[in-house]
Amino acid sequence: MINIGLEACIARLGSGVMRWSLVLFFIGFGIYKFTPDETAGVAPLMAHSPVLFWVGPLLGQRGGSDLIGAIEIALGTMIALRHVQAARVGLWKPGDFGRAAYLPELPVYNARP
């Protein structure tokens, strides 16, 4: 059997690894959205998304990619700050931010031409 103290230590370690992996993921991919390659890659996804279809005509390809990048960077920052000051960031758990961030893009991945 595993010692209760060891189990709590492993749980804290796993929680920290999950949190900071999400932070690096969101901030890294958020910064990548500001590059021309990713702007071209995101444009068809925005055009055919039932939630993000309005972003392209309103902001253009570059502006839409920049908007998504800014949202991803903000989510990564909020996840990082949740550990420091939970009351100021909100009541959501770190995993909720990850699920909420990609809800607009999910129907695009399952769409068939």
Image: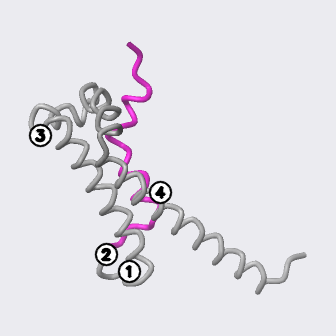
Circle 4: element type: helix
Judging by the rendered image, the residue that carries numbered circle 1 is: 86
User: Per the image, is 44 magenta?
Assistant: no
Q: What residue type is disc 4 on?
A: Phe
Q: Where is residue 81? Give x, y as percent.
A: 38, 77
Q: Quadrant of the N terminus?
A: bottom right
Q: Residue furthest left?
A: 58
Label 2 to label 3, Cα distance in Å?
28 Å
Label 3 to label 1, Cα distance in Å?
33 Å
Q: Where is residue 95? Give x, y as percent.
A: 47, 60
Q: Residues within 10 Å of mark 2 (few under 14, many from 20)?
A: some
Please name whichever residue, 82 or 29, is drawn nearer the observer in this view of the structure.
29
Q: Earlier in the sequence, mark 3 or mark 1?
A: 3
Q: Quadrant of the C terminus?
A: top left
Label ID, residue 89: 2
Label pair 3/1, CB-CB below 8 angstroms: no
Q: Where is residue 12? Give x, y as percent.
A: 63, 78
The image quarter in which residue 62 lies: top left
Q: What residue type is disc 3 on?
A: Leu
Q: What residue type is disc 2 on?
A: Val
Label pair 1/2, CB-CB below 8 angstroms: yes
Judging by the rendered image, the residue that carries numbered circle 3 is: 59
Left or right of residue 44: residue 53: left
Q: For the magenta stretch, what is the residue range?
A: 89-113
Residue 41 in the image: above or below residue 94: above
Label 1 to label 2, Cα distance in Å?
5 Å
Q: Earlier in the sequence, mark 2 or mark 3?
A: 3
Q: Where is residue 41? Give x, y as percent.
A: 35, 32
Judge depth for marks 3 and 1 and give the one in front: 3
Q: Earlier in the sequence, mark 2 or mark 4?
A: 4
Q: Residues within 10 Å of mark 1 (few under 14, many from 20)?
A: some
Label 3 to label 4, Cα distance in Å?
25 Å
